Amino acid sequence: MDSIRLDNTLPNVFLARTDIQSDIWRRDVTLEKGMTYLIEAQSGTGKSSLCSFIIGYRKDYDGRILFDDKDSRRYKNNEWTDLRRCHVSLLFQELRLFPELTAMENIEIKNSLTQFKTRKEIERWMEALGIADKMQSPVRLLSFGQQQRVAMIRALVQPFDFLLADEPVSHLDEINSKVMADIMMEEARRQGAGIVITSIGKHMNLPYDKTLCL
């Protein structure tokens, strides 16, 4: 997949509003593979909704979202499965980890489907992010910042053309934010992928090609 196009897209909940001022909503915007984007937003402007629309978890929007000029509303279930497994990876703001599983099990449950990374590669990322000692700890016992790091690694254990990260460093200090940014950027460049980061304030320090205001 080379592009994600948002054509006159708007969440249904905003349809009655006439005061929308956005670089994305009700615009014709194309996100290109290999580019890095920062989407800045205020709380309640729909940034998490945007991620859910793109990944196909929600369809309560007006307008169109196109992948390589194909309208996503025409996608069948098997096409969505392929998109989520091979083309678009999402780091959820709320993480969506399994609390009863360990940090490593949360990552391996996805990697077992993709067979994309070796255990040694995963362990190296965990070491770099300072959570190697939490590898066998149930996620429910980890801080939110530690869970963010687990969720980020899980998002990277698959092939992707676009990586969406919804407020990925909201609970991280500068050191861990930088390490996460470096790992994310390195993997995206290795795959030639695009990165889309959302933020309501604190954001990753990446070489953004474009900043859009939601």
Image: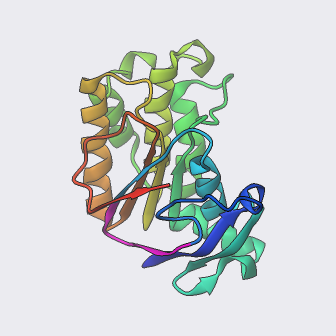
In the picture as drawn, the residue positioned furthest to the bottom comes out as 69
**Whole-percent x, y for residue 85 in the image:** 57, 62
**Whole-percent x, y for residue 173 in the image:** 32, 21
Q: Which residues are magenta?
A: 27-36
**Whole-percent x, y for residue 140 in the image:** 62, 17
Q: Nearer the viewer, residue 178 or 167?
A: 167
Q: Nearer the viewer, residue 107 or 147?
A: 147
Question: Where 17 falls versus 137 (above or below)?
Answer: below
Question: Where 196 falls versus 26 (above or below)?
Answer: above
Please check the rendered image and state whether residue 189 is part of the magenta-colored stretch, yes or no. no
Residue at 65% over, 52% down: 49
Asked where in the image residue 160 lies, by quadrant, the reply is bottom left
Q: Nearer the viewer, residue 132 or 195?
A: 195
Please check the rendered image and state whether residue 28 is part of the magenta-colored stretch, yes or no. yes
Number of numbered callouts drawn: 0
Residue at 31% over, 69% down: 34
Q: Nearer the viewer, residue 153 or 172?
A: 172
**Whole-percent x, y for residue 37 in the image:** 36, 59
Residue at 52% over, 66% down: 86
Asked where in the image residue 123 lies, by quadrant, the reply is top left
Main structural element of the magenta stretch: helix, strand or loop? strand
Q: Is residue 1 visible?
A: no
Left or right: residue 209 versus residue 70 is left
Question: Where 48 falls versus 37 (above or below)?
Answer: above
Left or right: residue 71 versus residue 164 is right
Left or right: residue 76 versus residue 119 is right
